[in-house]
Image (tube, rainbow, N blue to C red):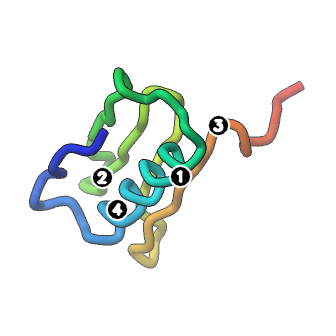
Amino acid sequence: MGGQPPQRLPESVVVAIRGVEDELATESVDASTWRWTLTYLEGKPVVELDDGTSIHLDPAGHAQVTNPDDAAEED
C-alpha cells in the first residue's frame, strides 16, 4: 500500500491501484498492514490486495477492479 509499483506494470493498473488506495483512505480504513500481491497469468498482471480486492486487465487492456463486497454471493 502506497509503495512504488514495478515499472513494467501497465499504467492503467497503476491508476486502478491508486484509486483503490485513495478510496480506502477516504473511507478511513486502516489498511496499514495490507499488501498488494502481484502475479502474472498468461503474461498479464493480476494484482490482489489482502482484503480480496483484485485488479486485472480485460481483453482490451483496461484495468478492471473486483471488490469482494461487490461479488455475487454463491448459494
Measure the C-alpha gap from mark 4 to mark 3.
18 Å
Is residue 29 left or right of 75 when viewed as pictured? left
Residue on which the image places disc 3: 68
Measure the C-alpha gap from mark 3 to mark 2.
18 Å
Q: Which sits in the foreground, 41 or 64?
A: 64
Is there a contact, CB below 8 Å, between mark 3 and mark 2?
Answer: no
Residue lying farthest to the bottom in this orientation: 60
Residue on which the image places disc 4: 13
Which numbered tag is attached to residue 23? 1
**Dot 1: element:** helix
Mark found first going from the N terminus, 4 or 3: 4
Amino acid residing under circle 4: Val
**Dot 2: element:** strand
Residue on which the image places disc 2: 45
Residue lying farthest to the right in this orientation: 75
* Residue 7, percent from left and from top: 10, 60
The answer to whether 64 is drawn above or below residue 1 in the figure is below
Mark found first going from the N terminus, 2 or 4: 4
Is there a contact, CB below 8 Å, between mark 1 and mark 3?
Answer: no
**Dot 4: element:** helix
Q: Which sits in the foreground, 45 or 49?
A: 49
Mark found first going from the N terminus, 3 or 2: 2
Closer to viewer: mark 1 or mark 3: 1
* Residue 22, percent from left and from top: 45, 54
